[in-house]
Amino acid sequence: MKFARIAVTGVDGEEARLVVVQPEAQRVVDLATAWRLRLEQRGATREAARRLATALFPASMSAAIALGEAFREAAAEASAAPAEEAVHPLASVRWLPPLDPPTIRDFTAFEQHVRNMAARQGGSVFPEFYQRPPYFKINPLTIVAPRPRSPGRTIPVIWTTS
């Protein structure tokens, strides 16, 4: 199985969804929707089915991977024979970054870099660098997914299992 994240339009606007990518069928299966529909067919109310599906297939790939084997097994079951409502044509999806870290910190401000930069400006490394090393912290929502250019598009898949 190939897992990825896509953007879908929900009641509150755009939301992230985990999908199983099935390139041979030119489609993706929205796992939360597929699981919700399966539960509804078994008699669950829409709200109860939604809560369970969201818990098992959160919008976060990191959270889903943390579920371990339960996630992979449920994904295999959900994507085996999904309802049409859970299927999206491969060409129509908008890919999201596959992973969603809580924060990103870039510690590229290492001493050699700072020393070279200071030397170019005729100075030396500022003393505060050794007392409180700087880092760059950004919001994880600033990650941008790849933008494929051709019909043979690259799919930003994070995890492939056999």
Image: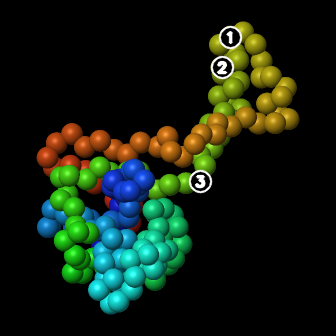
Q: Residue visible at 35% across and 78% down?
A: 35
Q: Secondary structure at mark 2?
A: helix
Q: Which corner quadrant of the image does residue 105 belong to?
A: top right
The answer to whether residue 108 is visible is: yes
**Which residue is farthest top?**
122
Q: At label 3, which amino acid type do we have?
A: Pro
Q: Which mark is residue 121?
A: 1
Q: Earlier in the sequence, mark 1 or mark 3?
A: 3
**Residue 51 locus on image (x, y percent):** 47, 75
Depicted 93 relative to depicted 106: above or below: below
Q: Secondary structure at mark 1?
A: loop
In this rendering, the label closer to the viewer, 1 or 3:
3
Q: Which corner quadrant of the image does residue 133 belong to?
A: top right
How many tags in the picture? 3
User: Which residue occupies the foreground of this view, 155 or 108?
Assistant: 155
| Quadrant of the frame with the N terminus | bottom left
Do tag 1 and tag 2 residues touch (Cβ < 8 Å)?
A: yes
| Label 3 sits on residue | 102
